[in-house]
Amino acid sequence: MHDLPFDTVLIANRGEIAVRIIKTLRKLGLRAAIVYHDIDAGTLAVAMADAAIAIDGRTPIAAYLDIGQIVAAARKANAGALHPGYGFLSENAEFARAITSAGITFIGPAPESIELMGDKIRARSFVQRHGFSVAPCAIEDDDPATFVRRARAMGPPLLVKPSAAGGGKGMQIVRDIGALEDAIAQARSEAERYFADGRLYVERYIEHPRHIEVQVLGDAFGNVTHLFERECSIQRRFQKVIEEAPAPRLSSALRQRICDTAVGIARAATYQGAGTVEFILGGEEFHFLEMNTRLQVEHPVTEVITGVDLVAEQIHIAAGHPLRLAQSDIVPRGHAIEARLCAEAPERGYAPTTGRVLVLDYPDGDGIRVDGGLSRGQRITTAFDPLLAKIIVHSPTRIEAAQKAHRAMRELVLLGCATNASFLARILADDGFLHGQIHTGYLEEHPHIAAGEPLTDLSDFLAIGALLTGPVRESADAVSDLHAALGNWRN
C-alpha cells in the first residue's frame, strides 16, 4: 500500500532511465505505463511496463517530443502522474503545464522553475541578484550592438555559450581573440539548430576547471536539503563520461560552501522536486554554472552513497508531501563511480556505432549496479543518444571503487555493436585519474586514452568464441524439421 493520490504513472521516456523508473514504481506498488515509438517496441522498458501506448512521428525523437500524443497516452493509460525522466521533454515548461492542465501530476518542478533555470541568462542574473557568484561574462541581450566588443574586452580564454544550452551543444572555447567572431557565429548556428534559440553569452573560461554539481531536493513547504556533491570533470566535448561521489581532493570546508550555496540557490528559487545545481571550480573558487530541473543521468552515484532513492523522493514530493529527510539524516558512505557505456568509437573521434545485440553479459557482484535498458536481439541505431547503460560501483574508498569499476568494464560483454567499454577501462586505470588530478579538459590533454589498443590477448578471443557458441547453437536448434531432414546437402 502507498499514501499517494495516484496508482498509475506514465513514463514519457525510453531506454535505461525508463527501466530505472519502473523499478521504483514497482517498489512503491504503483502501475507503470510507458509511451513508445515502433523502433522501441521490443525493448526491455516496454516489456517491463504494465501498459504501453504507441506514439509516432516524423522521426523517433519527434514522437517523444509530441506533447499532444503524450497527454493523450496518459489519459488512455488512466495515469494520475507522469515522470519525464531526463532529456526529451523533461525540462520543457510548456509540457509541464500541459500535463498539469490535463489534471495529471507532473513529477518535476513547477513550470516557472523550469523556465527560470532553463534560460541560462535568466538563471545567471537570478543567482547573481541573490548574492551568489557567477563567472564574469558579457550577455548579448544586454546590448547586442556592443556584444562582441564587450566580450573581446574580457580577454581570452573565453567560453561562448547559448542561452538555452544543454549537453554541451553550441559551446565554443576561444583562446585566440581573433577567432571570437567565428566562434560566436558557429555557436549561434548550433544553438538555432538544437534549441531554436540563437541568443548567446560569453563568460571567462577557467583553465583546467572542475565540474562539481550538488543534488538538491525541495518541497512545497519551503524545505530544501542537499545530498552532497558529484564530480563530473571527466568529459569529452562537454559531454560527461565518468561521474563520481564524493568529489576527490575537496576539503570539508569547500564542500560545505558549495553545498550550502546550492541549497541557497534552490531555496531562493522556491524549488520543488529533485534538481542539480552545477558549478565550475578553479582552485578554491567556484561559480554557478547552471541548474538542471530534472533527474540527472548520473544520479545513481548519489543514491548508492546516501541510500536515498531519488525517484521515490521525486514521486513523494510531487504528491504534495513534505521532505522525508532532514539534512542530518543524509550521511554519505564510501565512494561511488559511474561509467557511461555508449555506442561509440572513441578511437575514431567518438563516432556513433550501430548493430544488433548478439550477446549481453553485464558485470555483477557486491557493490555493482547496472542501470541498463538493453536486451538480446535489440537493434542499436543512431536514432537516439548513444548511451546504452550505466555501470555504477560502490566501495569504501575511491581507489577501491576505481579498481572495481575497471574490473567491471573488463568483465562486461556486449557483442554485436562496438562500444566505449575499453576506453572507460583505460580511464579508470589511468594514473592521473587514480590520483584525482582531473579537470574538464583531461581527456583532451591525454589523447592516448581515447586512441584505443588492439585486442591481442588470446584469452579474449577464446572468451568471445565461447560466448558466441550460445547464439549459434540457438540458431541451429531453430532450424525447421524440413530443412534439418536435408542432412548433409550442399550447394
Image (spheres, grey):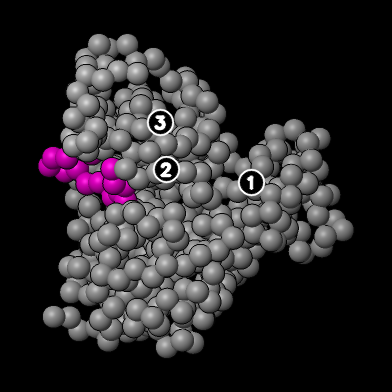
Viewer-side residue, 379 vs 424: 379
Q: Identity of the amino acid at label 1?
A: Met
Question: Magenta stretch?
Answer: 361-376
100 in relation to 132, above or below:
below
Which labelled disc corresponds to residue 358?
none
Q: Which residue is drawn at 53% across and 33% down?
A: 351
| Quarter holding residue 460 | top left
Q: Does the magenta stretch include residue 11?
A: no
Q: Where is residue 76 in the image (x, y as percent from the top left)?
A: 38, 81
Q: Distance between the residues labelled 1 and 3?
A: 28 Å
- Depth-wise, is mark 1 or mark 3 nearer the camera? 3
Q: Identity of the amino acid at label 3?
A: Ala
Residue at mark 1: 171
Q: Position of residue 260 (x, y in %)?
A: 39, 62
Q: How crowded is mark 1: few (under 14 residues within 10 Å), some or many (20 or more)?
A: many
| Quarter holding residue 59 | bottom right
Q: Is the magenta stretch mostly helix, strand or loop?
A: loop
Residue at mark 2: 380
Q: Horizontally, is 139 left or right of 260 in the view?
A: right
Q: Does the magenta stretch include residue 375?
A: yes
Pointers 1 and 3 in contact (C-beta within 8 Å): no
Residue at mark 3: 418
Q: Identity of the amino acid at label 2?
A: Ile
Q: Residue at x 75, y 33 (%)?
A: 176
Q: How crowded is mark 3: few (under 14 residues within 10 Å), some or many (20 or more)?
A: some
223 in relation to 484, above or below:
below
Q: How crowded is mark 2: few (under 14 residues within 10 Å), some or many (20 or more)?
A: some
Q: Position of residue 313 (x, y in %)?
A: 28, 70
Q: Earlier in the sequence, mark 2 or mark 3?
A: 2
356 in relation to 445, above or below:
below
